[in-house]
Image (tube, rainbow, N blue to C red):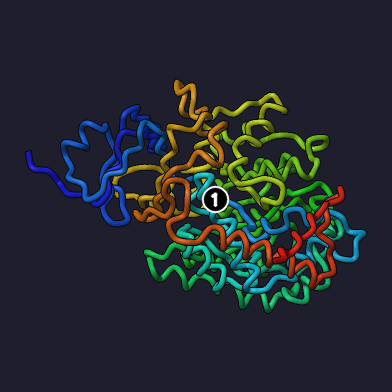
Amino acid sequence: MNRSTCDILIRNGQVITMASERRIYRQGAVAITGSRIVEVGADADLQHRYNARKTLDAEGGIVHPGFIDAHNHIVHTSCRGVFDDVRDTDSPVNFADWKAGVTAEDEAAAAVMAGLEMLRGGFTMFIEPGSLFHTEAAAEAVERVGLRSLFAPLYLWDRQETFDAIPSLVSPSLTARAPVDLDRSLGQLDVELHRNKDSEALVRGYVFLYGLGTASPELLQAAHSCARDNSVPLFLHAGYVPGETEIYRALNGTSQLVHLQELGVLDEHTVIVHANVLDEAEEDAVQESGCQIVWCPAAFFSLGLGRIADFKMAERYRRGVNVSLGTDAARDSTPGDTMLAAHYQSQTYEDPLSPGTLLEMQTIKAAAAAGMDAEVGSLESGKRADIVVRSARAAEAYPSNNPLHLLALTMGTGSVDTVLVNGEVVFSEGHSTRVDEAEAYRAVSDSVVARAARLGIGLEPEWPVVTAPAAPACSD
């Protein structure tokens, strides 16, 4: 029998493919050549068919397509511990000021740290929703870590009435750097799309309007046309909190998604982020248009919406709506916590989602939101080799009878052994192969201290910190 040659053979793993038949190979293997998957199948079959230049033994651990975070303000991860409540508007400096006070070096340091955290959680891609001031510096940082990403232009908006409902999202310093202006926004719509000329680029571009009622009909329609002309998705925030939806209805005479549908902006390539509070007419618009939804369960909990909002995500999913998962801003959690948060939210509302459904939302459904489901999101022949190998030696990998439950709900950060992105090993034996992790963590910590000092923000915890005195010098 003539054997084919492949670059890498991942063997002896529990392979969760996420392909259309949702097949799981208890003893499976994945053959890779260049940046693509050549074949996925039973370990014994692929070992007979391929001579591999390099073999990775999964040792019985779970092998799965890299998770995709469909909504992650990546730089906001560096806000951890800075504000007790990011919604506080009484302090002289608020969360919006923190966002505006960033330098290129701050964003690069935060992107590297957050990227390492994503790899540790089994993520190989994220979608950044237009909150980066220095996209070139951030893109270089993301590529250096080895992640895949979509970038959008900075804060596209030209109306600000709905900020009255969510004042912590805006400040004079933020709008000075990202003016609420139609001409600026129209001129910036396609600025990140140059990245799509290189089909091998890890960082690509798309279109994201801030949403929440901050875009005029002219800006909405121009963004939709730009996205369709360039074959990229259009994302926007909507249905975030009740106050925002009430202001939108008062200004426009109808609710936001109904208005988007009337404007011709809502279709299968439009992605609505949050959708926490939609009315019945908006639910109909979702169904009729075929638009997609990114659900951010940790953000839902942080907003305290459980007392006032209905839970519709499971129902939408059953109706065939493409629902994917996003972190939003990992200020109080990590991307690896998102499926667990979604699980708890669905349980709280007595409409539980299965582990398999949660995994779909974090892989193939998120790839569809990015417009990249033909490229990533599952382990199939011809797709990009974005693959995660979990350790079989992690305690949370047992009992091993149900790998879907383990992967969705218990195998968080710390169980990842190896990660490949585009066929390259970017994480091995629990560590980055591309960046100095200790230096990355030092850089982001120094960045936060300097940024807080510039803004006059104290970083002391609520309890006193005792600093040990320096050891006395030795005398002869």
Q: Is residue 361 above or below residue 176?
A: above
- Image location of residue 118, percent across then percent down: 54, 50
Q: Nearer the viewer, residue 330 or 129?
A: 330
- Furthest toward the front, the residue is 476
* Residue 178 in sight in this render: yes
Q: Residue at x 79, y 58 (%)?
A: 469
Image quarter in which the C terminus is found: bottom right
Amino acid type of disc 1? Answer: Met
- Image location of residue 470, percent across then percent down: 76, 60
User: Left or right of 62: which side holds 240?
Assistant: right
Q: Residue at x 51, y 36 (%)?
A: 359
- Image location of residue 105, percent across then percent down: 62, 72
User: Left or right of 21: which side holds 399?
Assistant: right
Label 1: state its secondary structure: helix
Q: Nearer the viewer, residue 100 or 47?
A: 47
Please tell me how crowded label 1 is: few (under 14), some (14-19), or many (20+) other residues with Cα within 10 Å.
many
Q: Is residue 474 above or below residue 281?
A: below
- Furthest toward the left, the residue is 1
Q: Nearer the viewer, residue 230 or 462?
A: 462
- Image location of residue 222, percent across then percent down: 60, 69
Q: Nearer the viewer, residue 418 or 68?
A: 418
Residue bearing mark 1: 118
* Residue 264 in sight in this render: no
Q: Residue at x 45, y 32 (%)?
A: 393
- Furthest toward the right, the residue is 90
Tally the marks. 1
User: Left or right of 455: which side holds 37?
Assistant: left
The image quarter in which residue 72 lies: bottom right
Q: Residue at x 74, y 75 (%)?
A: 179
Image quarter in which the N terminus is found: top left
